[in-house]
Amino acid sequence: MDQKKGDRAGLRLGGLVFMVCALAPFLSAQETILDSYERNFIRASLSTKAGILRDAATDDRSPEFIGQLYEFALNFSLGNAEILRGDPDMISLTVLACRGAGTAGYTASVDSLWKVFMAYRDSLTRVEALGALAHLGKGNIQVVENLNQFLANQNNLYRSGMAPDYPTLSACISALASLGNSASFPVLFSAMIAGYPNTIGQEAAQALGLIQGDYKQYLSDVIRKNPPAEKMAAFRAGMGTDRFGSAEKGQLAETALEVGLALSPAGREEDSAVSSLRYSAVSALTGLQWTEASPLVIKHFYRVQADYQNGAVSRERLLEAISCLGAMGSSDAAQALALQLGFLNSQTERSGEFDDAITLAVVNALGAIGDKSAFDYLLYISYLSYPEHIQAAAREALTQLKW
């Protein structure tokens, strides 16, 4: 009985061995092809390795292994980058591996391609790595973030006076255009207005046009996140485009004023840019009569009022702030103006001195709003020594109040 069991076990083992032997050519075929090319790649001289990659690409069985072979070559390039990154043969090999990985559609090489891009400094390698990433990185947010950060760094370096590697810069912009991720809008916008040569600026503008989505939101993001000069450029772009109606422009101007009020400029140049953003936003809000911004306009008015009293801004800025309050048409805006008129009346009653333009602007703005909270302050003008044209304006404003 034991002998029979042993015989059966022997038969099963023998059958298994037979099956393994019979299937061995099929089980190892794919591995053998890749292993063969990898062995030859390792043995070959540096100048011959590129030829092995070219031969492998023409192999009828290349779809089975070529992506992995390019990845193998990329890892070789990375492993030897420290000492051979400047070698012409190494550069040729790495360029071929980058291009091949992209052409093969081998998405597993994305990380290696980025590492190659960072390890090598020559334009040829970097341009090919970026071209491959543009093809393989679609939907990969990490690739987008990496390229965004690289372009942002290039923009900053250029502003500091350093000349960039223009072929690499152009390839990065092209890659971001191909990927088309909305997160790239702020950095592409920054590149467009950085002052690069016209060809680079045009490439950035074209890349912006390829990004689909909420254009107003993209500009708002630039206003909120980018440097002050770029905030102003984004605001102007929004105000000047035919793509927006009055509501979208009002929202963008509101965002600009909010940001301008919140910022604490680090220097004179930045302070000038932030101030320009604020005053431009106020001017736009006045024309658009965007009442949603009323709380921000009131805050702006009080700041300008204080700055004017301290001699930090001109009378024109205060007049603009008063006019904007009048355009808001809100009860809160009326109350802010009424308090201002109360202050002016007290000053006139006490000293007989007043600013004609400011007083008239406040009276007219209160009339435009028509809120009855201004009644007492407007009426009191008739008891003071204001000239007739201010008295007449106050009487007209009183007739415009809504009860």
Image: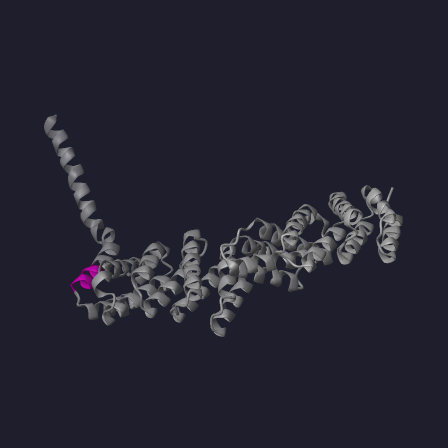
Query: Magenta stretch containing residue 42, yes or no?
Result: yes
Number of on-image labels: 0
Residue 115 lies, with reference to residue 401, above or below; the image says below
In the image shown, does 105 or 381 lie closer to the viewer?
A: 381
Tell me which residue sits at (86%, 44%) in the image: 402
Point out residue 336 in the picture as x, y percentages from the top left corner: 73, 45
Tell me which residue sits at (13%, 30%) in the image: 4
* Quarter residue 30 falls in: bottom left
Tell me which residue sits at (76%, 48%) in the image: 347
The quadrant of the image that shows the C terminus is: top right
Residue farthest to the bottom, as pictured:
198
In the image shown, does 272 or 171 lie closer to the viewer?
A: 272
- Horizontal relation, residue 166 to residue 293: left or right: left
In the image shown, does 356 or 303 lie closer to the viewer?
A: 356
Point out residue 253 in the picture as x, y percentages from the top left corner: 65, 55
Residue farthest to the top, as pictured:
1
* Quarter residue 38 falls in: bottom left
Q: Main secondary structure of the magenta part?
A: helix
- Horizontal relation, residue 140 to residue 215: left or right: left
Q: Which residues are magenta?
A: 36-43
Residue farthest to the front, as pictured:
351
Point out residue 186 in the picture as x, y percentages from the top left corner: 51, 58
The quadrant of the image that shows the N terminus is: top left
- Horizontal relation, residue 390 to residue 130: left or right: right
Taking the image as drawn, is residue 125 in sight? yes
Taking the image as drawn, is residue 241 in sight? no
Residue 88 lies, with reference to residue 134, above or below; the image says below
